[in-house]
Image (cartoon, rainbow, N blue to C red):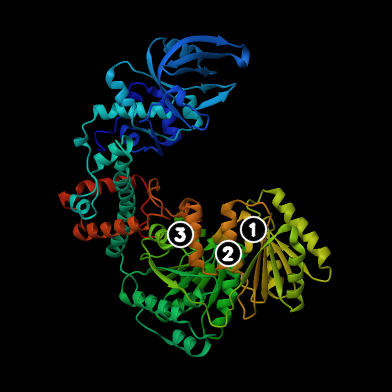
Amino acid sequence: MYNILKQQLQYLPGVGPRKAMVLASEVNIKTVGELLLYFPYKYVDRSIIYKINQLNDKMPFVQLKGRITSFSEEGVGRSYRLEAEFSDQTGSIRLVWFQGVKYIKKKLKTNTDYILLGKPTLFNFSYTITHPEMEELSNPNREIEILGLHPVYHTTEKMKRTNISSKFLENLIVGLFKQIDLNTIDETIPSDIRSRYHLMPLAEAIFKTHLPTSMEDLPAAQYRHKFEELFFLQLGILSCVRRRSVKYAGFRFDRVGCFMSSFYREKLPFQLTGAQKRVMQEIRNDLFSGRQMNRLIQGDVGSGKTIIAVMTMLLAADNGFQSCLMAPTEILAEQHFNHVSSLLSNMGLNIALLTGAIKNSRRKTLYEQLKTGEIHIVIGTHALLEDTVSFKNLGCAIIDEQHRFGVEQRSKLWRKNQSPPHILVMTATPIPRTLAMTLYGDLDVSIIDELPPGRKPIQTHHVYENNMNSVYKLVFNQLSLKRQVYIVYPLIKESEKIDLQDLEQGFETFRSVFPNSIIGKIHGQMKEDEKNEIMQRFTSGEIQILLSTTVIEVGVNVPNASLMIIVNADRFGLSQLHQLRGRVGRGADQSYCVLVTKRKLSENTLKRMEVMTTTNDGFLIAEEDLRLRGPGDIEGTRQSGLFINIKYSNLAHDAEILEDARQAAGYLINKDPGHTSSQYLSTWNRLSQLRGETQDYSVIS
C-alpha cells in the first residue's frame, strides 16, 4: 500500500498546489496514502427521499428530489441573494444562497432533476432551505450513488475557505477508489495474527470505513484500525525493551551489606507495609538478576515510595555504586535531601544536594567529589543533567514524578555512564493500566496500593463560594488545634494576572478574617530563594496559613498541615485535585479537603466534585480522569516520546483491544526476534516507516 500510494496530492485532478498546501498544513495530509487514512468522523444516511408535503421544521436535514423552476436575484449589498423555487409533485419550497451567487446561478439549471440536501426552516407558513447541497441526476446510476450512507470529514475554516469541504474530500476519495486496485494495497499485519484476532484485511477496512454500504460494515473495519494503531505502538515499545535487554547488561547488585542491613535493623522509622515489602522484593530481584532494571513504582500520595528509593540507593552503596535522585523542583529536591540525610545520618554515607541554587564554589567541589566517587548519593533537579556533571560509577538513577521531565532531558542522565544505570521511576499520580501500558510500556510496573498504618482517610467536602463562612469556621477550628492550613488558587499560567490578583485578594481577605494568625503566600513568580524561605517557615510551623498556587502540588510534606482548601476547584482536573489533597493527611490527625466552586457548574465538573468527595483511591480517580478527559489531556502524554499519535483508538474505552495488541506484538517479537523472516517483512517495514526520523530512546525509561 505504502509504495503505490506515495503520489503527492497536488497532482490529483481538482487538487493542485494551493489545496495540497492547505491539506498539508491543516491536517498533515501530503500523499494519496495519507488521504486514504484520513477517516470520516460520522456518516449521513441519505437513503430516504422526502416529499415536500412531508416537511416539518423539527427535521435536522432532509433529502428532496425535484426541479428548480425559476431563479431570482433579490436585495442589494449584504442582503443580496439568489433565490430559487424548487418543486416536486407535492409542492414547492424556496432555496436561498447568500454566497457564491454567480457560481451557483451558472452551475444550476431549470427543468433538470436534482437531489437536494439541507435543513428546512419555517417562516410565514412556507419552508426555506439556505445553501442546500445539490446533486444533478445526470444519469440513472447517479441517484443510486447518492442514496445510502455518506462519510463526513473534519474540515477546518482554512480548508473551507480554500473550497476543501467534506463533500470535496468524499468525491476525491471515491475517485481514488475507482483508480486503485485494492489488491495492490500492502497488508501490514501478518496473516497468522490477523487470523488469531479475526481482523479484516487492511484494504477492505479502509474501503468500508470510507464507503460503508450499511452501518453494519463499520464495527469490524474500525476494530481493524484501532488494533493496527495499538499493535504498532506496542510493537515499537516491546522492540525497544528487547533491544535494550540484548544490548545492555545491568550491574549486578548481589550484595546486601552493612548499609542496607544496619538501616533496616536500626534506622527504619516504621514497619514496612505488605505492599512496600512486595515492591522491595521486586526491585531486589531486578538488581540481583544481572539485567538492567527499568521499573515504575506507582503509589498514591503518602504510600511510602521514598523509603523504597532510599533502600534501593543503599543496595547500590553496598555494591560500590553511586546513586542519584532527580526531582522536578528545588523545593522537592531540598525536601528529599533533608529527609534522606536525616534517615541516613551517622552511617558514613556522603549525601549531596545539587540544584540551580548551589553557588559556584560549592558546585565545583560537588563536581569533583562526584567524579572521584566521594559522594555516594546526590539529590538534585535538572542541574544533574548538565554536561559538567559526571560520575565515577553511577549505578542507580531514581526519577521522582517522571512526567515532569521530557524524554530528551531524561536521556542525558542515562548517558552519564558507559553502561546505563538501573532506573527506578516514581510517580504519585496513579496511572490507569491502559495509559501505563502506552506511556510506560517498556517499564516493569510495581504498585504500592497500601497506606502506612494509622493514616486516617481525608474527609473531602464540596462548598459553594457563597458559603465561605463555613470554610472560615473549619480553618479556625484547625488553628485552635495547632494545625496548619493550605489555601490553593488556580494560577494556571504564570502570566495570568487575574489569577494572581485572586491570590492577592485572598491573602488580604484571610489576613482580615484571621488577624492573629501568621499568613504566608507562595507562587511561581517569586524568586526561588523566596519560595524556599516561605516553605521552610511553613514546614517549621511558623506560618500557620499558606496561600499558594500549584507550586506545592507535588511532594511537599508537612505532617502538621491538616486542611487543604482549593479555591475555584472547578478549574482543576481530577488528578491535580487528588495531588493537592495529598499534601494533607500525612500525619496521624484527621485531615480535611474543601473544594470551593461557583454554584453554576457543568455536568462534567459536578461529576469531578462527586468523585473527589466519595473516594480517596487514587487509582479509581485516575481511571475516572481518563474517562472524563481522554488520554490527550492527561499530564505527561505529550512528553512521553511516543512515535505514534493515537488517532483512532480511545485508551479509556479500548482496554481489551490494547491488551490483545500488546499480546500480538509480543508473539511477533518471539517468532521473529531478528526481523529476518520474509513472512513478517512488511510488518517490520511498516514499523520503521512509522518511526520515521524519530530519535531512538530505546535505552530510556
- Mark linked to residue 281: none
Find the distance from the CA under tag 2 to the CA under tag 1.
11 Å
Q: Amino acid at mark 1?
A: Ala
Q: Is residue 392 visible?
A: no
Task: Tell me the SS state at disc 3.
Answer: helix
Q: 473 left or right of 361?
A: right
Q: Amino acid at mark 2?
A: Met
Task: Tell me the SS state at disc 1.
Answer: helix
Find the distance from the CA under tag 3 to the CA under tag 2.
33 Å
Using a 10 Å C-alpha cutoff, classify the residue at mark 2 as few (fewer than 14 neighbours), some (14 to 19) or many (20 or more).
many
* Dot placed on the residue nearer the N-terminal end, 3 or 1: 3
Q: Amino acid at mark 3?
A: Arg
Asked if residue 398 is positioned above or below residue 68 in the image, the reply reads below
- Mark linked to residue 410: 3
Residues 601 and 503: in front is 601
- Give the percent coordinates (x, y) of residue 377: 50, 74
- Residue at 24% across, 58% down: 669
Q: Are marks 2 and 1 in contact (CB under 8 Å)?
A: yes
Asked if residue 62 is positioned above or below residue 239 in the image, the reply reads above
Between label 3 and label 1, give the one nearer the viewer.
Answer: 1
- Give the percent coordinates (x, y) of residue 513: 82, 65
Residues 232 and 253: in front is 232
Residue located beneath label 2 in the image: 612
* Dot placed on the residue nearer the N-terminal end, 2 or 1: 1
- Residue at 64% across, 77% down: 590
Residue placed furthest toward the left: 678
Residues 185 and 286: in front is 185
Task: Tell me the SS state at disc 2.
Answer: helix
Residue located beneath label 1 in the image: 569
Asked if residue 341 is positioned above or below residue 111 in the image, the reply reads below
- Give the percent coordinates (x, y) of residue 341: 57, 78
